Image (cartoon, rainbow, N blue to C red):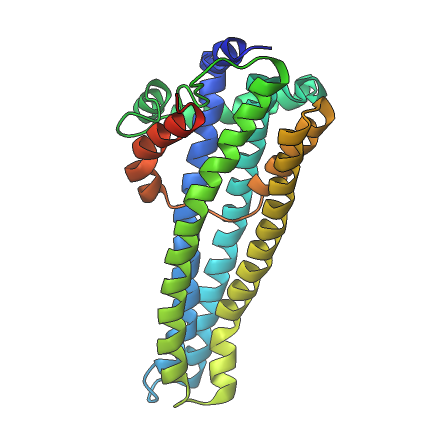
Amino acid sequence: MSNCDIVKKQNESFMLKVQYAARYCYNSAEKQNYFVWLFCLISAFCIFLPNGLPVYISFVVPFTADVFAWVLMVFVNKNVQKAADLRKYFDAYSIDIGAERYSETEKRQLAELAEKICSKDFKAAELQMKNTGNDSPPGVHDWYVFSKPYDGLEAKFECQRQNTWWDKKLFPVRCIVAYISLGVFIAIYIALALRNSFIITLLCSAGFLIKLIERVIDNGRYWILSIKIDGAQKMLEAHLTSEGVEQLQELIDERRAINILGINIFHKKCAKKLTSKYNNISNPE
């Protein structure tokens, strides 16, 4: 299978809808996740409510905020899983890795999901499906771009290399932004919490602490999978095999399903620059 075959498959209208739907789900999850953090912070900072208020208010407000955060988190996880399933489906058919494993029922379910998402805002979907990574705003057309000819397994592996390269460029930025923001909030919160009752502080902080623990766990899973992906990629560069390519794809698909979300604004600003940079380094001649 040559890179021309992959590009031909990728440009099919339906595959573009699937890729747009995946991006839409990831972006929706990102927005919802911001509100999850907002409700967690509202709950945590309820310990600073005026002392003159009825006691039950000091418990009802943070509890309500925690419930909203929990409900939203369910939607976040569902959107991440939908996005991961759609992107897995896209790769399975555009790169031709594991496409035969999908049943007709699974195909139709994913097709229905993609159509439903595209119909929510047809103009936005049409723009995304028309634009490439070099356009503004960056779109999903020509998702995999080849700067030189590839054949067979090498073409599939090149698509995987593009996936891992982009992740390495975007992941550190979202980590830096997240850690700085959390550090500022935690420092302010601890400084103020020292003046209040330990029990009230603990009760108000429950949602916030659970969210922090969840982030540590997901980041740990993401980091472990990233190490495995790097190792698998190095092995394939030394000895390219069909089995190795399939195993690498499974790791990539598994990592996509972890709730570690990108920053859409940063992607929009840097997509053109990163697209050009990858083309230059992948074919420096």
Examine the rendered structure and indicate whether residue 145 appears above or below residue 66: above
Quick one: which residue is furthest to the right in this view?
243
Quick one: which residue is furthest to the front in this view?
285
Q: Is residue 130 left or right of residue 160?
A: left
Q: Is residue 259 left or right of residue 243?
A: left
Query: Which residue is at the front of the view, 243 or 84?
Result: 243
Examine the rendered structure and indicate whether residue 26 appears above or below residue 106: below
User: Which residue shows up at 61% across the image and 47% down it?
Assistant: 227
User: Which residue shows up at 34% across the image and 81% down it?
Assistant: 49
Query: Which residue is at the front of the view, 126 or 164?
Result: 164
Quadrant where the C terminus sits is top left
Q: Is residue 187 visible?
A: yes
Q: At which x and y percent is residue 92?
A: 61, 22
User: Which residue shows up at 31% across the image and 43% down it?
Assistant: 265
Query: Which residue is at the front of the view, 203 or 176?
Result: 176
Q: At which x and y percent is residue 250?
A: 66, 34
Q: At which x and y percent is residue 153?
A: 63, 18
Query: Which residue is at the front of the view, 93 or 145?
Result: 145
Quadrant where the N terminus sits is top right
User: Which residue shows up at 44% across the image and 23% down it?
Assistant: 143
Q: Is residue 129 left or right of residue 74?
A: left
Q: Is residue 120 visible?
A: no
Q: How many callouts does the rendering have?
A: 0
Q: Is residue 167 left or right of residue 249?
A: left
Q: At which x and y percent is residue 22?
A: 48, 31
